[in-house]
Image (tube, grey):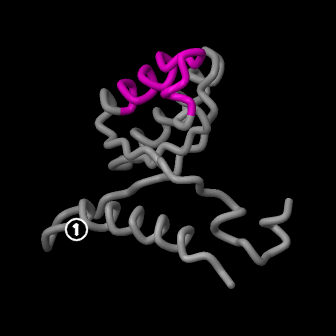
Amino acid sequence: MPSWKPLLAIAILAFCACKSGRAQPGANPQLWYFHHSYLSNQSAVTSSEALIDQAAAARYSGMVLWDSGIGFLQDSSWNPSYMSQVIQYAQSKGLAVVPVVAPCGYEVLLPQSELGRG
């Protein structure tokens, strides 16, 4: 029997993204992108900042931050400063940031496909 939890997580994320993305007539649409990273060192931060620069130049409105480190933020051995730096950088470029807090990936989105078995 398929689990409903992955579908619920996707529905909640979609609802949140769509709710804030409703545009008034004549307004420009909001453009968002899915930013995958693992912010465990300065090199990852630099790479993320370069991608954020491209998104800001293309006039994106925001990013959905999917970082494996989000699950480690409560862990005392994890350094959250890299993630804070990237979030602040994105916001300084005018991007809204929404973190993915539920497990989301091929195993959730495509549970029955060959891609999901990687």
Image position of 64 (left or right of 48): left
Q: Which of 24/85 is in front?
A: 85
- The residue under the point 47% across, 71% down is 8
Q: Is residue 10 above or below residue 85?
A: below
44 to the left or right of 63: right
Residue under the image location 84 percent in, 64 percent down:
117
Question: Start and end of the magenta stretch?
Answer: 72-90
Q: Quadrant of the N terminus?
A: bottom right
Query: Which image quadrant for residue 84?
Result: top left
The quadrant in which residue 57 appears is top left
Q: Is residue 77 magenta?
A: yes
Residue at numbered disc 1: 22
Q: Residue furthest bottom?
A: 1
Where residue 46 appears, as percent x and y from the top left, is: 58, 21
What residue is drawn where x is 27% and y is 63%? 21
Label 1: how many residues lie within 10 Å, few (<14), some (14-19) or many (20+)?
few
Q: Which x, y percent locates residue 30?
A: 31, 59
Q: Position of residue 4 (x, y in %)?
A: 55, 76
Total marks shown come to 1
Q: Is residue 56 left or right of residue 71?
A: left
- Of the pair 56 and 42, the residue shown nearer to us: 42
Please say whether residue 111 is one of the residues in the magenta stretch.
no
91 and 102: which one is in front?
A: 102
